[in-house]
Image: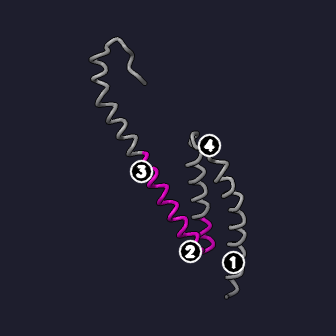
Protein backbone atom coordinates (compact mmCIF):
# COMPACT_ATOMS: atom_id res chain seq x y z
CA UNK A 1 0.00 0.00 0.00
CA UNK A 2 1.55 3.27 -1.09
CA UNK A 3 1.17 6.68 0.48
CA UNK A 4 -1.59 7.67 -1.92
CA UNK A 5 -3.66 4.56 -1.26
CA UNK A 6 -4.52 5.43 2.35
CA UNK A 7 -6.33 8.72 1.60
CA UNK A 8 -8.26 7.00 -1.22
CA UNK A 9 -9.26 4.17 1.11
CA UNK A 10 -10.49 6.67 3.72
CA UNK A 11 -12.37 8.63 1.05
CA UNK A 12 -14.02 5.40 -0.21
CA UNK A 13 -15.17 4.56 3.31
CA UNK A 14 -16.53 8.08 3.80
CA UNK A 15 -18.42 7.93 0.51
CA UNK A 16 -19.95 4.56 1.41
CA UNK A 17 -21.05 6.00 4.76
CA UNK A 18 -22.55 9.00 2.94
CA UNK A 19 -24.53 6.68 0.67
CA UNK A 20 -26.26 4.86 3.58
CA UNK A 21 -28.89 7.58 4.22
CA UNK A 22 -29.37 8.03 0.48
CA UNK A 23 -30.13 4.31 0.11
CA UNK A 24 -32.52 4.47 3.06
CA UNK A 25 -34.35 7.36 1.41
CA UNK A 26 -34.39 5.52 -1.91
CA UNK A 27 -36.22 2.46 -0.59
CA UNK A 28 -39.29 3.57 1.39
CA UNK A 29 -39.28 7.30 0.77
CA UNK A 30 -39.35 7.34 -2.99
CA UNK A 31 -41.99 4.66 -3.32
CA UNK A 32 -44.44 7.42 -2.42
CA UNK A 33 -43.03 9.59 -5.22
CA UNK A 34 -43.27 6.94 -7.97
CA UNK A 35 -46.20 8.61 -9.69
CA UNK A 36 -44.68 12.09 -9.63
CA UNK A 37 -41.75 11.42 -11.95
CA UNK A 38 -39.19 12.32 -9.29
CA UNK A 39 -37.88 8.80 -8.81
CA UNK A 40 -36.13 8.62 -12.21
CA UNK A 41 -34.52 12.01 -11.56
CA UNK A 42 -33.37 10.92 -8.10
CA UNK A 43 -32.05 7.64 -9.49
CA UNK A 44 -30.17 9.49 -12.23
CA UNK A 45 -28.69 11.85 -9.63
CA UNK A 46 -27.46 8.92 -7.53
CA UNK A 47 -25.99 7.21 -10.58
CA UNK A 48 -24.11 10.35 -11.60
CA UNK A 49 -22.80 10.85 -8.04
CA UNK A 50 -21.63 7.23 -7.92
CA UNK A 51 -20.08 7.53 -11.36
CA UNK A 52 -18.14 10.62 -10.36
CA UNK A 53 -17.06 9.08 -7.05
CA UNK A 54 -15.96 5.89 -8.81
CA UNK A 55 -13.80 7.93 -11.16
CA UNK A 56 -12.31 10.19 -8.48
CA UNK A 57 -11.74 7.38 -5.97
CA UNK A 58 -10.58 4.82 -8.56
CA UNK A 59 -13.14 2.38 -7.14
CA UNK A 60 -13.70 -0.45 -9.61
CA UNK A 61 -16.48 -2.03 -7.52
CA UNK A 62 -18.47 1.20 -7.54
CA UNK A 63 -17.73 1.67 -11.24
CA UNK A 64 -19.18 -1.76 -12.08
CA UNK A 65 -22.24 -1.21 -9.88
CA UNK A 66 -22.83 2.18 -11.50
CA UNK A 67 -22.55 0.68 -14.98
CA UNK A 68 -25.13 -1.95 -14.07
CA UNK A 69 -27.49 0.69 -12.65
CA UNK A 70 -27.11 2.84 -15.78
CA UNK A 71 -27.89 -0.15 -17.98
CA UNK A 72 -31.02 -0.95 -15.95
CA UNK A 73 -32.18 2.67 -16.15
CA UNK A 74 -31.57 2.77 -19.92
CA UNK A 75 -33.55 -0.43 -20.40
CA UNK A 76 -36.43 0.96 -18.33
CA UNK A 77 -36.46 4.17 -20.38
CA UNK A 78 -36.40 2.19 -23.62
CA UNK A 79 -39.33 0.03 -22.47
CA UNK A 80 -41.33 3.12 -21.52
CA UNK A 81 -40.58 4.71 -24.89
CA UNK A 82 -41.63 1.54 -26.73
CA UNK A 83 -44.87 1.41 -24.73
CA UNK A 84 -45.61 5.05 -25.54
CA UNK A 85 -44.99 4.46 -29.25
CA UNK A 86 -47.27 1.41 -29.22
CA UNK A 87 -49.99 3.43 -27.50
CA UNK A 88 -49.70 6.27 -30.00
CA UNK A 89 -49.89 3.84 -32.92
CA UNK A 90 -52.96 2.21 -31.42
CA UNK A 91 -54.58 5.59 -30.86
CA UNK A 92 -53.77 6.77 -34.39
CA UNK A 93 -55.33 3.63 -35.79
CA UNK A 94 -58.65 4.11 -34.00
CA UNK A 95 -59.03 7.92 -33.99
CA UNK A 96 -60.24 8.14 -37.63
CA UNK A 97 -62.73 5.34 -36.91
CA UNK A 98 -64.06 7.28 -33.91
CA UNK A 99 -64.47 10.46 -35.94
CA UNK A 100 -66.42 8.64 -38.63
CA UNK A 101 -68.85 7.00 -36.24
CA UNK A 102 -69.19 9.82 -33.69
CA UNK A 103 -68.86 13.08 -35.64
CA UNK A 104 -70.47 15.26 -32.94
CA UNK A 105 -68.34 14.06 -30.05
CA UNK A 106 -65.21 16.04 -29.24
CA UNK A 107 -61.92 14.34 -29.90
CA UNK A 108 -60.55 12.87 -26.63
CA UNK A 109 -57.36 14.49 -25.39
Residue on which the image places disc 2? 60
The first of marks 4 and 1 along the sequence is: 1
Q: Residues within 10 Å of mark 2 (few under 14, many from 20)?
A: few
User: Which residue occupies 71% across, 63% down?
Assistant: 18
Q: How is the image coloured?
A: one colour
* Horizontal and vertical percent position of residue 89: 32, 36
Residue on which the image places disc 4? 33
User: Which residue occupies 60% across, 75% down?
Assistant: 58
Disc 3 and disc 4 in contact, CB within 8 angstroms: no
* Horizontal and vertical percent position of residue 6: 71, 81
Dominant secondary structure, magenta: helix
User: Which residue occupies 63% across, 73% down?
Assistant: 57
**How far apart, in angstroms, are the residues tagged by discs 1 and 3?**
37 Å
The first of marks 2 and 1 along the sequence is: 1
* Horizontal and vertical percent position of residue 34: 58, 43
The first of marks 3 and 2 along the sequence is: 2
Residue on which the image places disc 3? 78
Residue on which the image places disc 1? 9
**How far apart, in angstroms, are the residues tagged by discs 3 and 4?**
21 Å
User: Which residue occupies 58% across, 47% down?
Assistant: 39
Question: In the image, is residue 73 part of the stretch drawn in magenta?
Answer: yes
**How far apart, in angstroms, are the residues tagged by discs 2 and 4?**
31 Å
Dot 4 lies on which element?
loop
Q: Residues within 10 Å of mark 1 (few under 14, many from 20)?
A: some
Q: Is residue 19 above or below residue 3?
A: above
Quadrant into which the N terminus falls: bottom right
Q: Range of the magenta residues? A: 52-80
Amino acid sequence: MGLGALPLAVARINYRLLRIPLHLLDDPGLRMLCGTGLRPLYTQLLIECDRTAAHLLADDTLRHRTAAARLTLARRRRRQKDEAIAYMRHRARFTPHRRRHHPHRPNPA
